[in-house]
Image: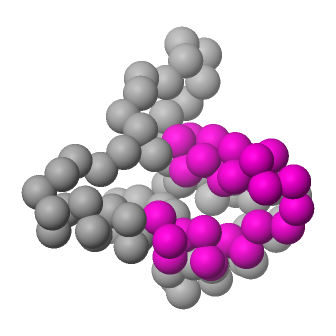
Amino acid sequence: MGTSVPDAGRPAFYTVKETAEILRVDAATLYRAIREDAFPAVRLRTRYVIPAAALDALIAEVAESGGVVDLARFVAERRMMRDAARQSGGGWR
């Protein structure tokens, strides 16, 4: 996930409802995944928002793999890469 600036007409973050609609899942399913740390989100007090970059990365992974992507595994791998980069003093993208 990079630090790119969002396109002019596109939000940098989506609500859970908007993300659920994009993914064609129930919002309750997405809330469960977020609470189980299986879907990337930003928590602002009692509200969650989903970075557009996270959706872009997920879509790219699905397109690249050509198959089914286990979202929990995808998020865990990204988290491990981020933590490794932090420990080694490198930046995270």
User: In screen coordinates, is 53 left or right of 42?
Assistant: right
Location of residue 66 by image quarter: bottom right
User: Residue 86's spot in the image, x, y percent?
Assistant: 19, 62
Q: Quadrant of the C terminus?
A: top left
Outermost residue on the top side: it is: 8
Location of residue 83 by image quarter: bottom left
Q: Is residue 86 above or below residue 8?
A: below
Q: Nearer the viewer, residue 36 or 58?
A: 58
Q: Is residue 12 visible?
A: yes
Residue at position x 60%, y 69% from top?
74
Q: Is residue 37 above or below residue 81?
A: below
Residue at position x 69%, y 52% from top?
61
Region of the chain picked out in magenta, as a range: 52-78
User: In screen coordinates, is 45 left or right of 61?
Assistant: left
User: Residue 79's spot in the image, x, y percent?
Assistant: 41, 69
User: Residue 36's spot in the image, x, y percent?
Assistant: 54, 86
Q: Is residue 66 magenta?
A: yes
Task: Give the dominant element type of the magenta stretch: helix, strand or loop.
Answer: helix
Q: Is residue 65 above or below residue 84?
A: above
Q: Is residue 38 magenta?
A: no
Residue at position x 53%, y 42% from top?
53
User: In screen coordinates, is 16 left or right of 43?
Assistant: right
Outermost residue on the left side: it is: 89
Outermost residue on the bottom side: it is: 36
